[in-house]
């Protein structure tokens, strides 16, 4: 679940020879009815997306990037030369980078149910002229993937070279291998799970309750500028703690106090730097995310359960044809290494080509977003080697 509000500012895109440069978002409009897994439907939908690189003549060099809970379609480059921050995975994607846009045609879309240009609860319901709110259909990971497939068909992609994603993006990657086994050749999932544990579901529920107990939520009927901003900020603050580790938080903040803090004053004003940081996270998030989308997407995360949906994880993976690499991180306590490793165990038991890699880091769940030469080498090797039966040395 990417920490978009904590990406450090950088130089303009033109100063970085490894950047895709200035990019523009586009909208794919699917003008036919779309039926969700729940049985609910929409008369059509829009996905906002970006592409980097060029689709080759064989139309088989495409790589799909799947974003996490708080992510969006803008994963590389900048929207203007003076943008303060690049796309959320700019360190991984670009000419000469691990996902090399000189070789690959890279696509990323804001997921169905999102709030950054794609159709979601904040979109206008044509039947009422008002935002859908909680009248929006319940969305699942499978619904997100099916909508992405329609986008790729529109773009003329014949075969996906790879689908890549971390956290919720990793769930989408797994679903791609199950749903469209003949279409995708490689699956690269990071910091993910085949189903959330009780603790992850519990954290999501606390966030949802923070939103729904905010009087401004108004049963999901609000204008975005006046919605449950306090509840959404609290949900973000709480969730952000799960994306990092105790070691990384302690190293970054320790018990350092704000310069304005008055010793051990008995006050509820900000005393510690970590308090200020979390409040900043909450305030930044409410300026770019919709509370109802947060409710819908966290529920989609909770409902993703391959064992329940298919009878067993091995049965779920029976259709998979793609080579698979799953990457876990030692300090990830949201989707810990054993959950990532279990995905590969199930793939191997199902007779599939799969490898598990585990990177030692103390940065927590968000490790897949941060700069790591070891991660870059893994990604580059997996994407660029010739297709072959994988030999697993890691389990």
Image: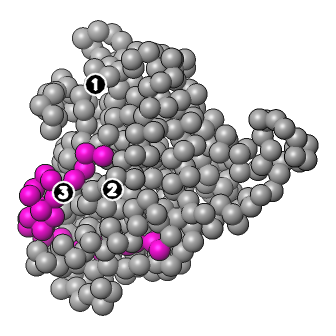
Q: Earlier in the sequence, mark 1 or mark 3?
A: 1
The residue labelled by disc 2 is 197
Q: Position of residue 142 (x, y in %)?
A: 20, 47
- Residue 208 sits in which quadrant? top left
Judged left or right of residue 205, residue 371 is right
Q: Position of residue 304 (x, y in %)?
A: 25, 50
Residue at the far top: name it.
128
Q: Secondary structure beneath disc 1?
A: loop
- Circle 2 crowding by C-alpha within 10 Å: few under 14, some 14–19, many from 20: some
Q: Position of residue 141 (x, y in %)?
A: 25, 47
Q: Eyeballing the image, is 250 above or below 49?
A: below
Residue drawn at (15%, 34%) of the image: 38
Span colored in magenta: 302-330
**Which-is-in-front pick, marks 3 and 2?**
2
The residue labelled by disc 1 is 136
Judged left or right of residue 20, residue 46 is left
Q: Is residue 102 visible?
A: no
Say which mark, if any, is on residue 306. 3
Q: Earlier in the sequence, mark 1 or mark 2?
A: 1
**Which-is-in-front pick, marks 1 and 2?**
2
């Amino acid at each position: 679940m990417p920490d978009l509000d904590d990406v450090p500012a950088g130089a303009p895109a033109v100063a970085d020879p490894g950047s895709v440069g200035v990019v523009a978002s586009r909208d794919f409009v699917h003008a036919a009815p779309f039926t969700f897994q729940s049985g609910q439907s929409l008369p059509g939908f829009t996905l906002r997306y970006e592409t980097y690189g060029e689709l080759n003549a064989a139309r088989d060099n495409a790589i799909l990037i799947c974003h996490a809970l708080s992510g969006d379609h803008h994963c590389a480059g900048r929207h203007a030369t003076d943008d303060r921050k690049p796309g959320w995975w700019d360190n991984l994607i670009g000419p000469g980078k691990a996902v090399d846009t000189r070789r690959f045609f890279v696509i990323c879309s804001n997921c169905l149910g999102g709030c950054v240009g794609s159709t979601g609860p904040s979109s206008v319901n044509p039947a009422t002229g008002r935002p859908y709110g909680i009248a929006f259909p319940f969305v699942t990971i499978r619904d997100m993937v099916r909508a992405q497939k329609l986008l790729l068909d529109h773009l003329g992609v014949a075969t996906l070279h790879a689908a890549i994603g971390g956290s919720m993006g990793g769930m989408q990657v797994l679903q791609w291998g199950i749903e469209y086994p003949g279409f995708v050749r490689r699956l690269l999932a990071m910091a993910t799970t085949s189903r959330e544990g009780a603790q992850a579901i519990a954290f999501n529920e606390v966030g949802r309750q923070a939103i729904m107990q905010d009087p401004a939520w108004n049963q999901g009927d609000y204008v975005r500028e006046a919605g449950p901003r306090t509840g959404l900020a609290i949900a973000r603050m709480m969730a952000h703690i799960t994306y990092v580790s105790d070691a990384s938080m302690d190293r970054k903040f320790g018990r350092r106090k704000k310069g304005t803090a008055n010793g051990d004053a008995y006050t509820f004003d900000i005393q510690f730097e970590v308090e200020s940081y979390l409040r900043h996270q909450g305030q930044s998030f409410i300026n770019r995310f919709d509370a109802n989308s947060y409710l819908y997407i966290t529920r989609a995360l909770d409902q993703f359960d391959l064992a329940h949906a298919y009878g067993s994880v091995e049965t779920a993976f029976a259709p998979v044809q793609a080579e698979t690499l799953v990457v876990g991180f030692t300090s990830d306590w949201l989707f810990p290494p054993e959950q990532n490793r279990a995905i590969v165990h199930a793939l191997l038991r199902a007779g599939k080509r799969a490898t598990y890699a585990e990177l030692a880091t103390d940065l927590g769940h968000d490790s897949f977003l941060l700069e790591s030469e070891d991660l870059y080498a893994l990604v580059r090797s997996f994407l660029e080697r010739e297709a072959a039966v994988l030999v697993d040395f890691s389990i």
